[in-house]
């Protein structure tokens, strides 16, 4: 078998390019979206420090007295297929700065979650409609809507 000799040139430029890319990438490794730990309902005698995530869980999966309203799972099912392409677009547009790219993706997902809550149909029991004065299954005082947020995760 004959020997093959290769001479590679430009290695220093490649190393410099990769070092510059690594410096530009940033420290973000992902994004969390939803109702984060610090989000609580305003303190009232019946809701002292109640976490928004807990109420969202009850809405999502239902209770013995309320039906499941899978607003979060429905949003994920509808949006998940687009997240990879969006992240790719945001990374390219941000010169591969992951902090910026994941921030943009977090905003998109948060907005989709808020839309999912807003679009939920009028499905309250008549007694709940009388108490609230309107019929919307996921909105009472708007606390859950306002508490929807994202957090960029760092390595």
Image (cartoon, grey):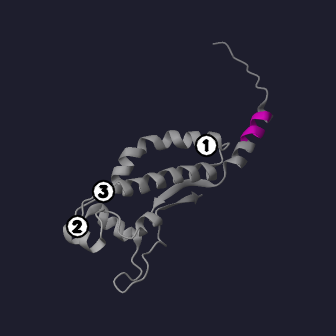
Q: Is residue 71 left or right of residue 99?
A: left
Earlier residue among tags 1 and 2? 2
Front: mark 1 or 2: 2
Q: Are marks 3 and 1 in contact (CB under 8 Å)?
A: no
Q: Is residue 3 placed above or below 64 in the rendered structure?
A: above
Front: mark 3 or 1: 3
By secondary structure, the bulk of the magenta-drawn segment is best described as helix
Earlier residue among tags 3 and 1? 3
Q: Quadrant of residue 133?
A: bottom left
Q: Residues within 10 Å of mark 3 (few under 14, many from 20)?
A: some
Q: CA distance from mark 3 to mark 1?
A: 31 Å
Q: Residues within 10 Å of mark 2 (few under 14, many from 20)?
A: few
- Marking on residue 91: 1
Residue 52's spot in the image, x, y percent? 40, 70
- Residue at (75, 43) in percent of width and height: 20
Q: Which residue is mark 3?
A: 70
Of helix, strand and loop, which one carries label 3? loop
Residue 49's spot in the image, x, y percent? 42, 80
**Magenta highlight on residue 14:** yes
Of helix, strand and loop, which one carries label 2? loop
- Residue at (56, 40) in percent of width and height: 88
Please give the range of residues in magenta. 13-18
Residue 89's spot in the image, x, y percent? 57, 39
Q: Which residue is mark 2?
A: 66
Q: Is residue 131 left or right of residue 84?
A: left
**Magenta highlight on residue 84:** no
Of helix, strand and loop, which one carries label 1? helix
Q: Quadrant of the N terminus?
A: top right
Q: CA distance from mark 3 to mark 2?
A: 12 Å
Q: Are marks 3 and 2 in contact (CB under 8 Å)?
A: no
Q: Quadrant of residue 92?
A: top right
Residue 147's spot in the image, x, y percent? 46, 66
């Amino acid at each position: 078998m004959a020997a093959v000799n290769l001479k590679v040139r430009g290695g220093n430029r490649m190393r410099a390019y990769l070092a510059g890319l690594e410096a530009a990438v940033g420290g973000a490794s992902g994004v969390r979206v939803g109702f984060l730990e610090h989000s609580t309902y305003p303190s009232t005698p019946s809701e002292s420090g109640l976490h928004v995530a807990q109420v969202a869980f009850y809405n999502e999966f239902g209770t013995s007295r309320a039906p499941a309203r899978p607003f979060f799972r429905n949003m994920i099912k509808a949006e998940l297929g687009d997240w990879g392409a969006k992240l790719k677009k945001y990374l390219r547009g941000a010169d591969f700065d992951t902090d910026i790219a994941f921030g943009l993706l977090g905003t998109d997902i948060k907005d989709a979650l808020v839309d999912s809550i807003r679009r939920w149909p009028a499905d309250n029991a008549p007694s709940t409609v009388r108490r609230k004065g309107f019929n919307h299954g996921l909105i009472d005082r708007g606390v859950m809507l306002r508490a929807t947020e994202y957090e960029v995760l760092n390595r």
